[in-house]
């Protein structure tokens, strides 16, 4: 599991758009770097980022090599009811890192 | 009054390049965009390591955790980073924060030391240094610390490598000037561990020293070596009064 950080407001007013932020610690090796011995460092990246709210995909991103390390996403979510906001990061080897937070809608 | 005008000019002329009357944080040499990245506690990538360190703080190993002795880090670790490196009598030499963390692990927790520059040690160091954010550096200089600082000072002024440059040639005589597109900072260490954009990862002061040594084509010393701890000691003396910014973002 990689170190992650998420920011989801704990309380929000129905119908408003709230800012969601998510970041994961990851080298995002693009396959063009060399180690100290001159050997190529193989590609090692996160390939998918998914955010779910009310059991529905609200954001789905496909990541490619060439992105900077520690990918960071920020977006707005229009909230309708109290629910868990779930985050998933898939890496190229199929490992999944999950994180979640609950948002209370008043 | 008439004699004052040229004097003022001279002072201002000197301040443009390499004025060392007051220490300036590396933060002040950054572009506004990079400063904004450091200011935002969420988007600052260094906070990923601080977060990982926060989890490690309470993680039990061999029945103990950092928390079981030290309690809440926000109370007990506040101000600890500003006091290192320092002389520890039982070790018999000046050690830095990383070495103190490892000493705690081996002596008190009876678990293996983390490798220098390992993910674990960097995370814990970042978390501890983060607790002292905003506090001015105030290292006490007893006899041993003074000796270590003097050794560090010699290191700082000694020319080395194929380019035959001392730390002082860039970071003292030419700070504020440019090296290609980069603005040369004073090389202060108040932001370490730093998230360095060039590395795309977090690194300790010793990694930066080694990087700098390699840049002047000198053989770097091993990370965690006494030479670098002494240099760190001297850097602390130079940056007295600067506030801790860990984890800082640098180019």
Image (cartoon, grey):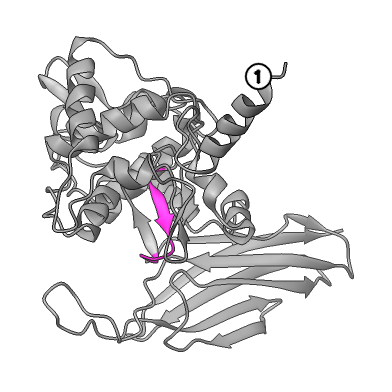
Q: Which residue is mark 1?
A: B3
Is residue B10 or residue B28 the one in the foreground?
Answer: B10
Q: Is residue B207 left or right of residue B217?
A: right
Q: Residue at x 32, y 81 (%)?
A: A44
Q: Is B191 inside the magenta-drawn segment?
A: no
Q: Report if residue B127 is visible in the image.
A: yes
Q: Report if residue B104 is visible in the image.
A: no
- Locate residue B60, reporting x and y percent: 29, 41
Residue under mark 1: which chain is it in? B
- Kindly indicate the quadrant of the structure image that contains residue B182: bottom left
Is residue B4 or residue B13 the one in the foreground?
Answer: B4
Q: Is residue A21 left or right of residue A67?
A: right
- Locate residue A42, reporting x and y percent: 25, 85
Q: Is B194 inside the magenta-drawn segment?
A: yes
B131 over A33 or under it: above or below: above
State whether the magenta stretch is mostly helix, strand or loop.
Answer: loop
- Locate residue B192, reporting x and y percent: 39, 43
The segment highlighted magenta reads: B192-200
B82 over B47 or under it: above or below: above
């Amino acid at each position: 599991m990689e170190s992650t950080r998420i920011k989801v407001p704990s309380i929000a007013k129905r119908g408003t758009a709230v800012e969601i932020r998510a970041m994961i610690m990851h080298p995002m090796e693009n396959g063009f770097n060399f180690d100290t011995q001159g050997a190529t460092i193989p590609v090692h990246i996160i390939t998918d980022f998914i955010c779910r709210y009310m059991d529905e995909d609200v954001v789905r991103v496909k990541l490619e090599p060439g992105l900077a390390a520690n990918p960071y996403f920020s977006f707005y979510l229009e909230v309708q009811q109290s629910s868990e906001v779930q985050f998933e990061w898939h890496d190229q080897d199929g490992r999944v890192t999950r994180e979640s937070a609950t948002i209370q809608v008043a | 009054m008439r004699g004052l005008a040229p004097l003022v000019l001279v002072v201002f002329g000197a301040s443009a390049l390499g004025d060392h009357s007051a220490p300036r944080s590396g933060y002040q040499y950054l572009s506004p965009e990079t400063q904004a990245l450091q200011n935002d506690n969420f988007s600052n990538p260094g906070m990923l390591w601080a977060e990982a360190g926060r989890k490690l703080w309470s993680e039990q190993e061999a029945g103990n955790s950092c928390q079981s002795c030290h309690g809440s880090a926000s109370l007990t670790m506040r101000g600890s980073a500003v006091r290192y490196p320092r002389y520890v009598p039982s070790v018999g030499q000046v050690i830095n924060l990383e070495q103190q963390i490892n000493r705690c692990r081996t002596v008190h927790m009876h678990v293996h030391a983390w490798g220098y520059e390992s993910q674990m040690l960097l995370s814990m160091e970042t978390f501890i240094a983060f607790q002292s954010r905003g506090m001015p550096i105030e290292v006490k200089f007893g006899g041993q610390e003074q000796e270590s600082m003097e050794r560090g000072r010699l290191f700082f002024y000694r020319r080395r490598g194929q380019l035959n440059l001392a730390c002082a040639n860039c970071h003292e005589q030419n700070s504020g000037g440019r090296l290609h597109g980069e603005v040369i900072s004073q090389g202060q260490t108040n932001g370490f561990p730093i998230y360095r954009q060039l590395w795309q990862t977090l690194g300790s002061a010793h990694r930066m020293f080694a990087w700098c040594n390699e840049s002047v084509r000198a053989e770097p010393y091993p990370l965690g070596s006494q030479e670098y701890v002494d240099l760190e000691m001297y850097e602390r003396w130079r940056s007295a009064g600067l506030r801790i910014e860990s984890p800082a973002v640098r180019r």
